[in-house]
Amino acid sequence: MMADLKKPDLNKGEVWIGVTTGKNGDVYHVILLPGDNDDATFADALAWAKGIGGDLPTRVEQSMLWATHRDQFQKSWYWSNETHHKYDDYAWSQGFVNGHQDDEPKPTKLRARAVRRVAI
């Protein structure tokens, strides 16, 4: 099945990351959008991503980004779109220095990159 998948059309500056599934089983392409946001709280990073037509990546998508496209990122920490499952005032982030994921207080200022998803 995966060999038959056609990559979606990309806009200028976008990078196709791969295919993954969501929590409800939907299959979709992950596309990294151009641009970078520095020193943003979790709420500001989410708003920035939506403002450019995207979303922050999930933790799974961030793992994909680290594994295959870490050259697209500063050696820094980046917000995911996921709030911590136990602590509403924390959200998950991805380190592009060492590949670790960690939870951070939402008022912390981190970098952000946006993705868009195309359903298959």
Image: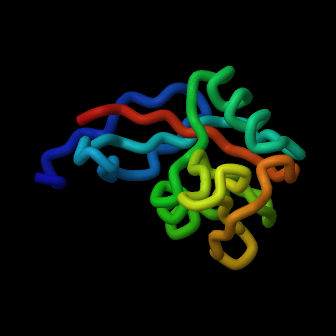
State whether residue 25 is above or below residue 14. Answer: below
Viewport quadrant of the C terminus: top left
Closer to us: 92 or 65: 92
State whether residue 23 is above or below residue 97. Answer: above
Residue at 63% x, 63% y: name it: 70
Dividing the picture into quadrants, the one containing residue 104 is bottom right
Residue at 60% x, 58% y: name it: 84
State whether residue 73 is above or below residue 10. Answer: below
Q: Position of residue 80 (x, y in %)?
A: 62, 51
> In the figure, is residue 33 to the left or right of 103?
left
Q: Where is residue 92 in the image (x, y as percent from the top left)?
A: 64, 59
Spot the residue most to the left: 1
Closer to us: 103 or 19: 103
Q: Where is residue 102 in the image (x, y as percent from the top left)?
A: 67, 69
The number of callouts visible is 0
Spot the residue most to the bottom: 98
Residue at 27% x, 45% y: name it: 24
Q: How is the image coloured?
A: rainbow
Q: Where is residue 35 in the image (x, y as percent from the top left)?
A: 73, 36
State whether residue 88 is above or below residue 119. Answer: below
Closer to us: 68 or 46: 46
